[in-house]
Amino acid sequence: MRRRAFLLVAGLAGTAVTAPNALAATGVEVDPAALLAHRLEGVLLGGGPVSADRPVPVATLETVLATARADFRACRYVELAARLPELITTTETAHHQTGDPALAGLVAQAYNLTTRALIKLEASGLEWVSADRALRAAESAGEPLTLAEAQRLLGSACRRAGHHGRAQDLTLTAADQLDLGGKSPDLRHLSLYGVLMCSAGYAAARSGDRERATDLLDEAHATAARLVDHPAQQHALAANVISHRVSADYVLGNAGSALQHAQTAQLGTFPDTERRARFLVDVALCFAQWDKPGRAYQTLLAAERTAPGEVRTRATVRRLVGDLLRHPQQASLPGLRQLAARTHALV
């Protein structure tokens, strides 16, 4: 068990990514999406908790989880692919040995992060497995914020599968369970409530319900206004609302309106690299829908400069690059085939 704890801590210093680094050193381009899918499939469809002499301390697991989250926020998906399976296995083992609710909460958070990563890839069914495990662990932990996030991500899995009504129900049920009472509600609950309204609004847009999507996103906007005494959280939620308005208008086929919303965004207000890059990719999708391939391409390049890992991992980007390759104006997009190679869009 001391060896397992050592490996987890060593992973914080980068030794957990020895294999990907070795591939890079030999000139082999790592496909982050394939690596994530392979590594996470192994832990999600493999065996359960492993035997160990004693559980890894909660503090050690919290440190590794924090590092994995930092990997995700920075779009370091190769590193995340190396770190996350070990974290899941070790945390589940510790919870299996002790039954500690705090460890159940860490299990749920690790699976929530896994679901967020899987949603970036082509749908495979793995996202359903991780979302279900997160929900079960969160219910065992009794942590309302972790449970609400697990319900939101299960809703995301439903939305990807076309179950838009179910996605809204799950997300709104999660929102109803948050504590927003009193003159000064818990900042964490209020912030998550706004995020849940964004998710529900996007699900409504995916179902074709423009009015419902607008109402829910307006509710998220109003929630951001309630965070006036907490500027960092207010700016982050306001940026998230704009991003979701762009996404909602895009899926509703209204790229012009989406791009108008995008013009009101300031990239510096997005809380991390992942969200900035995700927003830029959505803007590129809108330009493509508006039949502006040059603008779409330039926005993709801007997204890649912001976060190479995001652009080279997301299935959405690969489809968009494939569309640009087939566009009649593709010859006027210098470097497009090189981008296609970097994003693994070439087959």
Image (cartoon, rainbow, N blue to C red):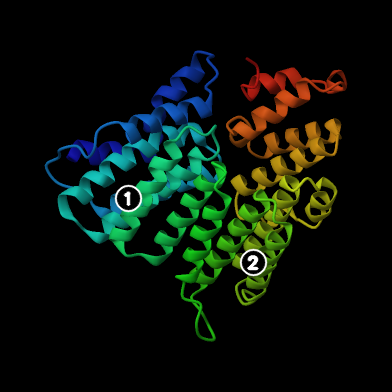
What SS does tag 2 mark?
helix
* Residue in the image at 66% along x and 43% along y: 277
Query: Is residue 326 shown left or right of residue 70?
Result: right
Query: Is residue 50 shown left or right of residue 176?
Result: left
Residue closest to the eye, 293 or 122: 122
Three-letter amino acid code at the position of disc 1: Val
Please give the residue where the numbered disc 2 appears in the rendered image. Answer: 220
Residue closest to the eye, 171 or 113: 171
* Residue in the image at 57% along x and 61% along y: 195
What SS does tag 1 mark?
helix
- The CA distance from mark 2 to mark 1 is 29 Å
Please give the residue where the numbered disc 1 appears in the rendered image. Answer: 107
* Residue in the image at 73% along x and 62% along y: 211
Q: N-terminal of the two: label 2 or label 1?
A: 1
Local crowd size for mark 2, using a 10 Å CA cut-off: few (<14), some (14–19), many (≥20): many
Check the image and report above or below for 198 versus 43.
below
Across and down, in percent, residue 13 comes to 39, 38
Quadrant position of residue 17? top left
* Circle 2 or circle 1, nearest the eye: 2
Residue closest to the eye, 126 or 80: 126
Q: Is residue 56 in view from this perspective?
A: no
